[in-house]
Amino acid sequence: MPEVMDVGVAWGRMKVGRYPRLVEVFPGLAADIVHLLRADGDGDSLADTVEDLPFHGRCTCGATCANLLTAPVGSPCPYLVELGHGDEVAILLSLDATATAITAIEVLDGRDLVPAVDLSV
């Protein structure tokens, strides 16, 4: 598994209703996460979970926040996994207390996070 850091953080707000899968809303991001986890060599167990991650919406703490929620608000996320190329971190994954489930994704590489599906329904 990639290096896991203890950060002791829980945050965010979730959308109400049925949750689409992250792979449906942000397919390119989901593919990048899987690729980076598998490239690490130790992230296969987390990579296997990405296809089924629910998308609970964006963090609403501020207009420029790039956190995407994949668990309900208040879900513990005491661990972080850094994903990127070389020394440049592109994505931070927040993990649950067991370090086996992704609870949030922070996108740091500046990509435009435009949903691939209409979320207004």
Image (cartoon, grey):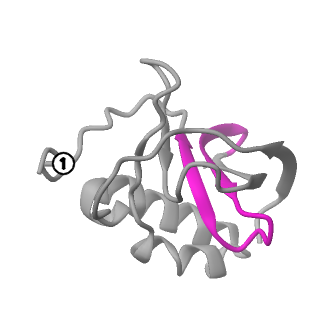
- For label 1, the residue is 119
Residue 100, x across and y down, in percent: 70, 74
Q: Give the farthest residue toward the right.
A: 6
In the image, residue 16 sits, relative to residue 49, either above or below, namely: above
Residue drawn at x 50%, y 26% as measured from the top left: 65
Residue 34, x across and y down, in percent: 50, 68
Front one among 65 and 15:
15
The image quarter containing residue 115 is: top left
Which secondary structure dominates the residues rendered in magenta? strand
Residue drawn at x 64%, y 70% as measured from the top left: 101
Residue drawn at x 28%, y 64% as measured from the top left: 18
Q: Quadrant of the N terminus?
A: bottom right
Q: Give the farthest residue toward the top.
A: 63
Front one among 87 and 106:
106
Residue 61, x across and y down, in percent: 53, 25
Count all numbered tags in the image, as a single digit.
1
Bounds of the magenta segment: 86-106
**Relative to 55, 88 lies left or right:** right
In the image, residue 112 sits, relative to residue 3, either above or below, namely: above
In the image, residue 51 sits, relative to residue 112, either above or below, namely: below
Front one among 69 and 50:
69
**Magenta highlight on residue 98:** yes
- Near mark 1 (Cα within 10 A), the count class, few <14, some 14-19 or many ≥20, is few
Name which residue type carries label 1.
Answer: Leu
**Magenta highlight on residue 9:** no
